[in-house]
Amino acid sequence: MEVGKVYRVAGPVVHATGLKSHMYDLVLVGEDGLMSEVIGISGDKHIIQVYEDTAGVRPGEPVKETGAALVAQLGPGILTSIYDGVQRPLPALAEASGDFISRGLFVDGIDHKKKWDFEPVVKKGDLVKPGQPVGTVQEQLLIKHKVMVPPNLKGGEVKEIYSGNFTVEETVCVLDDGTELPMIQYWPVRTARPSTVKMAPTIPLRTGQRVIDGFFSLAKGGTAAIPGGFGTGKTVMQQTLSKWSDVDIVVYVGCGERGNEMADLLHEFPELVDPRTDRPLMERSIVYANTSNMPVAAREASIYTGMTTAEYYRDMGYDVLLTADSTSRWAEAMRELSSRLEEMPGEEGYPAYLGARLADFYERSGRVTTLGGEEGSVSVVGAVSPPGGDFTEPVTQNTLRIVKVFWALDAKLTQRRHFPSINWLESYSLYDLDLEPWFVENISPDWNNNKRRAMAILQENAELEEIVMLVGSDALPEDQQLTLEVARMIINYWLAQSAFHPVDTFCPYEKQFDLLEAILGYREFAFEALGRGVPVDVINSAASKDALAKIRLLDDYKPELEKVMKQMADEFKVMS
């Protein structure tokens, strides 16, 4: 391999001469061998971004080629891991260098010495194709890791297949052309893993959050953005989604978040209990922790490393949720690198290719038929942290052009202690029409109609509130006063949900439908009574109305709901 020399150093960007590397090849910079990546070639000079601190690096120091791109190590042992941005396990780094990470450390992404019990699923003489499993490993209690033929090989006839305990580097299968297959794969993080077919988004991703499932559903394999200012609940929202979404694997990328916030997450996340198994959620999770004080180049790479890991488990036929917190910090890393490269700045100093990079990332999501014939998905939820909560800034606007679900977190709702603080007037989902048939077939023919009726009530409520602020609610006609009360019930009884209540933290589809149906049923009773001349204050004093508020907190809610609805019918029958 060629050895070049450092020509110029500008923060995390280094210029070197004497190299023959290609774009995005990995190189080792300086005497310490700092992990770096080629991001530009100009004549005989290579422009390199360094994933570690470049303090002390000076012109004339060596730059060594590796001949390979930045790759993720994929194989048994990824689950439960906590990595930095370039897939170095943080516990292994701490063991090698103490509390402060030394420069130039290289640690394998997965343990190359641990032995795994490999069970073949093919036999000698079978034909295998790219992406097809040749065996399995029980990686965690409920996750069976499928050892697949890498997508970049052509496959062939199985010449030898082994069974027993092996390390990830040992050969478990030999093909007729002499190709030896270990359990580990190496895949360039900036290259999307291929699939056979990308399917239409026709199945919802169940989250158990009424405001999301009921109003702004995300499809499996879909993309969503959670923009919100400081303290609006982005991290709690992402933890809730990780815990309750009906996915098999969770990949959490902490991209450029504050160190203390990331430390809290690393303490809390392993303690979260998986409600499906009553075991630690971490058993089916992977965390990439890249804080704001770490080098910006590694922050930029962490997004791609996390996505490659998610695609790998998708190829096994699993549903994967990738949450990125936050893509704003990723964009800021791109902005800093772009300025070091002296590129022409775009809006607010961000590079002109900001939208293209965001699109490249989000486009790697999807529900697909894999090369091995399985069905898997990667759903992406990206948090955006606009400065001052300004949704007109470039990262938010470019993200909204790409994603199909927008959950707008509202600081005013947070101040009112309304959680999840998703603003139901600013948010939207473009998957509604695709998902409507599924809800009609699996939940109720009235699901979509009820959703539209509730949204219309909330829209009218927003218009009336402006008048109420000027003249008070008593000045409104009685039918509009009733609309305000029904809207209040939808907001407080249905949209508000506690992430810390043992029952209310998760709401199944059927319960969501029944609760909203009951509130809309109250509206029918109320307007019928108003038509008979019953005063609004009498209608609003119905005891059954307040009893509805407690239903959402009950696990076995149906008997109580039937009792309340019967009480409601009886109350309105005699109301005058």
Image: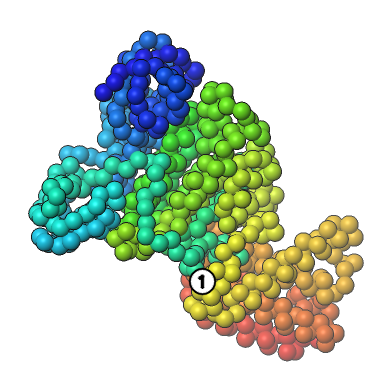
The residue located at (56%, 33%) in the rendering is: 332
- Looking at the rendered image, the quarter that the C terminus falls into is bottom right
Name of the residue lying farthest toward the front? 43
Front residue (pair 153, 547): 153
Q: Is residue 550 above or below residue 172?
A: below
The residue located at (68%, 56%) in the rendering is: 426
Q: Is residue 529 above or below residue 215?
A: below
Instruction: Measuring from the top left, give residue 117's x and y in whole percent.
Output: 15, 53
Front residue (pair 15, 18): 18
Instruction: Measuring from the top left, give residue 62's x and y in whole percent.
Output: 33, 15
Amino acid beneath label 1: Tyr
Q: Secondary structure at mark 1?
A: helix
Residue assigned mark 1: 509
Instruction: Measuring from the top left, give residue 375's x and y in whole percent.
Output: 36, 64
Color style of the picture: rainbow
The residue located at (81%, 70%) in the rendering is: 481
Residue 452 seen in this snapshot: yes
Front residue (pair 429, 488): 429
